[in-house]
Amino acid sequence: MTFTPHGRHLIAGDWVGGEDFFENEPAFGPAHRFSMGTVELVERAAEAAEEAFWSYGYASRAERAAFLTAIA
């Protein structure tokens, strides 16, 4: 079975992935391969979220919408 890679993590504006993966095998549709998170990735994500918290909190609705659209 061929697995499609998916599931990288967006941390501080960068798409990163761990070294370990897990694979799903759905009854219908393509199978996917997902990057597993690590303690280091969680710590990096938490630090990035803390740094971004205040600037995002003071952003206008339009600025937030533009950001969310860009990463969707």
Image: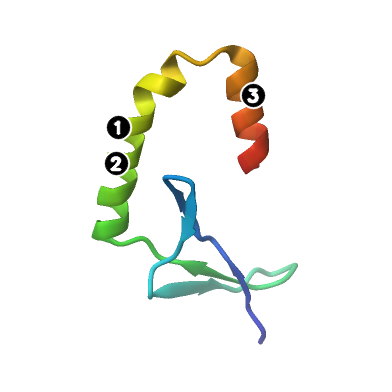
In the picture, measured across the screen, residue 25 lies left or right of residue 57, that is right
Q: Secondary structure at mark 3?
A: helix
In this view, which residue lies farthest toward the bottom? 1
Q: Secondary structure at mark 2?
A: helix
The disc placed on residue 65 is 3
Quarter of the N terminus within the rendering: bottom right
Q: Quadrant of residue 46?
A: top left
Badges 1 and 2: C-beta atoms under 8 Å apart? yes
Residue 28 position, x and y percent, is 74, 67
- Label whose residue precedes the other's in the sequence (1 or 3): 1
Q: Quadrant of residue 33?
A: bottom right
Q: Residue at x 34, y 46 (%)?
A: 45
Badges 3 and 2: C-beta atoms under 8 Å apart? no
Q: Is residue 2 above or below residue 28?
A: below
Q: Identify which amino acid the numbered label 3 is placed on.
A: Ala
Residue that label 2 marks? 46
Quarter of the C terminus within the rendering: top right
Q: Quadrant of residue 5?
A: bottom right
Q: Secondary structure at mark 1?
A: helix
In this view, which residue lies farthest toward the right? 29
Question: Which colouring convention does the figure follow?
Answer: rainbow
Residue that label 1 marks? 50
Badges 1 and 3: C-beta atoms under 8 Å apart? no
